[in-house]
Amino acid sequence: MRNFAILGAKARTMLPSGSLVDQVTLDDVTVSCGIVETAEPEFRKGPDDERRVLVRVKAFSLNYRDKNRVFSMVTNGSAEGFYVIGSEFVAEVLAIGSGVTRFAVGDRVMGNNSYPSSGCDGVLPGVPTNHASKEVQIFHEAKLVKVPDSMPDATAAAFSIGAQTTYSMIRRLEIFDGANVIVTSAKSNTSLFAIQALKHRNVNVYALSTSDRFHTELQRMGVKELVVIDPQCENFAKHPILGQLFGRLGGFHFVIDPYFDLHLSRVIDVMAVGGKYITCGLYDQYLQMIQKQPGPTYRNGRELVSVMLKNLHIMGNCIGLTTDLQAASRDFESGALEVTVDSVFSDGRIAAFLDRTFNAKDRFGKVVYQYN
C-alpha cells in the first residue's frame, strides 16, 4: 500500500529503484518527500475487531498542523526513516467487524474528530490519525462518519476537521441576528469554512487579511468588507479602517480567529462590550524548529485589563462534536455550506502538492492529493 511520507536524509537513497521521490523547499528548508510502499494491515474480524472498519484511502489533505510534523521529521527524525503525514481523508470501506452497525462495505467515509469525547468508552477523542495518507487503515467505527452522496471525493478529503471545528465555534459563540463578526486570517482554511458557514445567517461578516488578493471571492462568500492589515499593526483600534468601523458600529460582537498568537492582543480594543472571541489554534507551531521568528504575537497580560473592563468572553476551541460534523454535512447536502477546494494533485506530483499546500500565495482553499 502507498504512504505519502517525509523522508529522512538517507531514506531517499534506500527506497527501491523507481520509487516516487522528490524535494520541495518549505520556509527555506529542503524537504524530501516520497510515496513509500508498505505492507497492508491484517484485518482478522476477531473479537478485538468486532467494531472496527477496514478502509482504503482514496484522497487526503494536509492542515497547518501537518507542517509541525513535517519539520519535526526534517529536524529530529531518523536519517534512515520516514514519517507518513496527513490530517483528513476520504476512504472506501473494505471490510467491517461483526459488531459494526454504522457502515457497510462500499460506503464512503471520512474522519470523525469528535473532541473532547469520542462518544465511545475506550476510544480516544480527536483526529482518527496523524497519518491520513496511509492507504489502508483500520479504525473504530466511532472514528468515522459517512460521506454524503452528493459530496465529491476531493471535497470529502478536505472537509471533516475544518467543518467540525468551525461549526463548533459558531455553536459556542451563540451568534445572534444582526451581529457584527470579525473573521481573521481570511484565506486560512478554517476561516474560509467559517465565512461559508455564516453566509446564510443574518450577520455582518468583516474579514481581515494581509492582502486583498481574493477580495472579489470573499465578497461573493458574503463578506461585507475585507480589511487589509499590516502584520506590524499592533493595535487594530488605531487602524484607519477598523478604527472607523469600531466607532460607527460600536465594536464587533464576535471574533473567529484561527491564530490567537497573531491576533488576540490586537483585536480586543475593537470588540464591543460583552463581545465574544474564540480561537482554535496558534501560528507559531513550528518556527522555532527552523530558527524562524514569528510576527507580532501575544506578549503579555496587559490586554486582560480591557478584557475585564469590557466583560469580554475569551474562548478556546478544540475541534468539535460529532453533531457539529453532522450539522455541517447536512448544510452541505442542502446547499447552505460550500467548500473551497483549491486544486487536486495525483500521478506522483508529490512535491507540487506540498508546494501548493504550504507555499503558494495564490492558493485559495484546500489542496487535495488523490490516489489513482
Image (cartoon, rainbow, N blue to C red):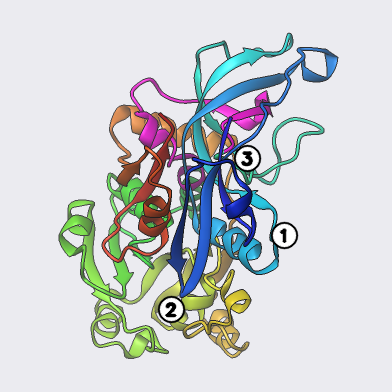
Using the numbered discs, state the Cα–Cα distance from disc 2 to disc 1 in whole angstroms.
Answer: 42 Å
Using the numbered discs, state the Cα–Cα distance from disc 2 to disc 3 in whole angstroms.
Answer: 29 Å
Residue in the picture at 39% in, 52% down: 194
Image quadrant where one finds the N terminus? top right
Residue found farthest to the left? 216
Q: Which mark is residue 129?
A: none
* Up/down of 134 relative to 161, above or below: above
Residue in the picture at 57% in, 69% down: 314
* Up/down of 65 relative to 112, above or below: below
Amino acid bearing label 1? Ser
Q: Earlier in the sequence, mark 2 or mark 3?
A: 3
Residue carrying label 3: 114
Residue carrying label 2: 267
Q: Which residues are magenta?
A: 134-163
Neighbour tally class for label 3: few under 14, some 14-19, many 20 plus, Cα within 10 Å: many
Q: Is residue 89 left or right of residue 188?
A: right
Neighbour tally class for label 1: few under 14, some 14-19, many 20 plus, Cα within 10 Å: some
Residue found farthest to the front? 17
Q: Which mark is residue 78?
A: 1
Image quadrant where one finds the C terminus? top left
Q: Earlier in the sequence, mark 3 or mark 1?
A: 1
Taking depth in this image into account, of 217 and 68 the one nearest to the observer is: 68
Work out whether residue 74 can be spotted: yes
Q: Residue 175 at what x, y percent from top left?
A: 42, 54
Query: Which element is circle 3 on?
Result: loop
Q: Residue 40 at what x, y percent from top left?
A: 66, 26
Work out whether residue 181 can be spotted: no
Amino acid bearing label 2? Val
Query: Which element is circle 2 on?
Result: helix
Amino acid bearing label 3? Ser
Query: Which element is circle 1 on?
Result: loop
- Asked which quadrant contains residue 284, the reply is bottom right
